[in-house]
Amino acid sequence: MVVRLLYFAWLRERLGCAEEEVTLPAGVDTVGALLGWLSARGEPYRQVLTETARIRSAVNQDFASDSSPIRAGDEIAFFPPITGG
């Protein structure tokens, strides 16, 4: 399954890329499983994506949780918590 990943703010800076298209192995079908798979890709993914308390996600521009399903063609975004005033 091929998905498009977007990284924003400090995640983009630390990973060195704003977006990428990846082919996921069988069984990686939730946001949580995706984060685990990405972290296993090695540095800098492991260092950045294991900071789960500091990362929010969205699937196709809708806020998502670790249990949110992902499907072929989805766009998954990772970003820091949003605050405003």
Image (cartoon, helix red, strand yellow):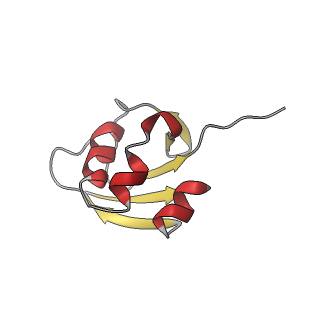
User: Residue 33: image x %, image y %?
Assistant: 27, 41
The image shows residue 50, relative to residue 21, as above or below, that is above
Q: Nearer the viewer, residue 43 or 23?
A: 43
Quarter of the figure with residue 30? top left
Q: Residue furthest bottom?
A: 16
Quarter of the figure with residue 3? bottom left
* Image quadrant where one finds the C terminus: top right
**Residue 53 visible (yes or no):** yes
Query: In the shown orientation, is residue 51 left or right of residue 34?
Result: right
Query: In the shown orientation, is residue 64 left or right of residue 36?
Result: right
User: Residue 62: image x %, image y %?
Assistant: 54, 38
| Badge count | 0
Q: Nearer the viewer, residue 37 or 27?
A: 37
Q: Residue at x 16, y 44 (%)?
A: 27
Q: Residue at x 33, y 53 (%)?
A: 46
Q: Residue at x 50, y 46 (%)?
A: 60
The image shows residue 73, relative to residue 68, as above or below, that is below
User: Residue 71: image x %, image y %?
Assistant: 32, 46
Q: Residue furthest left?
A: 26
Query: In the shown orientation, is residue 84 left or right of residue 10?
Result: right
**Residue 8 visible (yes or no):** no
* Image quadrant where one finds the N terminus: bottom left
User: Residue 18: image x %, image y %?
Assistant: 53, 66
Quarter of the figure with residue 29? top left
